[in-house]
Amino acid sequence: MDAGYLRITPIPTAGAEPLKDNQFYIVYEAKKNLEGNRREVTRSGAAVPLFRLNAGDYHIVSSHGNARATLDVTVTADELNEQTLDMNVGYLRLANVMAEGKEALDDGVFYIVYGAKKDLNGNRKEVTRSGAAVPLFRLNAGDYYVVASYGRSTTALDVTVEAGSLEERTMIQDAGIFRAETRLEENGAALEDAVFWIVYTAERDLNGNRREVSRYGQAKPLITLKAGKYEIDVRYGNETYTFPVQLSPGEISELSLLLQK
């Protein structure tokens, strides 16, 4: 069959400079089969690809990070079809701090980005996730809901991403950290094994039950929690010891517990 050429130049939004990286294309035949699927023809990771294709109709799916755009084109034999593809993409850079005025966290943070809209069951659709401390998300313009976790602390953010723009936000965890250990006697050595920890909320429900927050099997766990009041059950041998504790936002403290009945 006679072949023609297709060159695609991606832009973040109308009137903007072309995108130069993080671009990916998949070219499909335009026609769908009985199951509603299209046959893939080729793909490219070049920012501005030049495809040589048999004359005919095609459907292109392009991605820039987590932004998606599609294009329907016709390729004519012995001709070059040049297309500009509006990716409708914006950028979201996030950072997390333990408390207002603290330095940005450089590890241990995890993000999940959802579409802002909920379905009939009240659930949001996940868009992407990242374990980078300060991630840069490439997203289609629109509204999003971001959940960031740090240890057992979580915080959420509603944010709007605009095409061609960078949105920078700092999320505040209002969290604290315990460096925890136990000992059997005053001035004794810290226990090195066989210690089990369960952290509960201090508040009890109408049935008098506490809600479990986290548990640890290390003798000396690093416990990261949302600021507030808690109860910690420490199990050692056949005994369980309960301690009330409290964390303030941004606090990093040593928690040395004496296991005595």
Image (tube, rainbow, N blue to C red):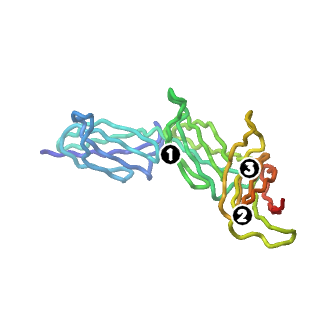
Residue 237, numbered label: 2
Question: Mark 3 or mark 1, which is nearer the start of the sequence?
Answer: 1
Q: Secondary structure at mark 3?
A: strand
Q: Determine crowd level at label 3: few under 14, some 14-19, many 20+ residues with C-alpha closer than 10 A.
A: many
- Depth order, front residue of 115/56: 115
Vertical comparison of 6 with 239: above or below: above
Q: Which residue is disc 3 drawn over?
A: 175
Q: Secondary structure at mark 2?
A: loop
Q: Residue at x 81, y 50 (%)?
A: 246
Badge 1 amino acid: Thr
| Circles 1 and 3: CB atoms closer than 8 Å | no
**10 Å crowding of disc 1: few (<14), some (14-19), many (20+):** some
- Tally of numbered tags: 3
Q: Are marks 2 and 3 in contact (CB under 8 Å)?
A: no
Q: Nearer the viewer, residue 132 or 247?
A: 247
Q: Quadrant of residue 77?
A: top left
Tell me: 58 left or right of 103: left
**Label 2 is placed on what type of residue?**
Gly
How far is the residue under mark 1 from the one under mark 2? 43 Å
State which quadrant residue 216 falls in: bottom right
Q: Is residue 1 above or below residue 144?
A: below
Question: Is residue 72 placed above or below 43 in the rendered structure?
Answer: above
Residue that numbered label 1 is attached to: 128
Q: CA distance from mark 1 to mark 3?
A: 24 Å
Q: How far apart are the two marked residues, 2 and 3, measured between alpha carbons?
A: 31 Å
Location of the N terminus (image quadrant)? top left
x%, y% of residue 27? 29, 44
Whether residue 198 is visible to the viewer of this picture, yes or no, is: yes
Residue 243's x, y, as percent?
81, 53
The x and y percentages for residue 213 are 68, 47
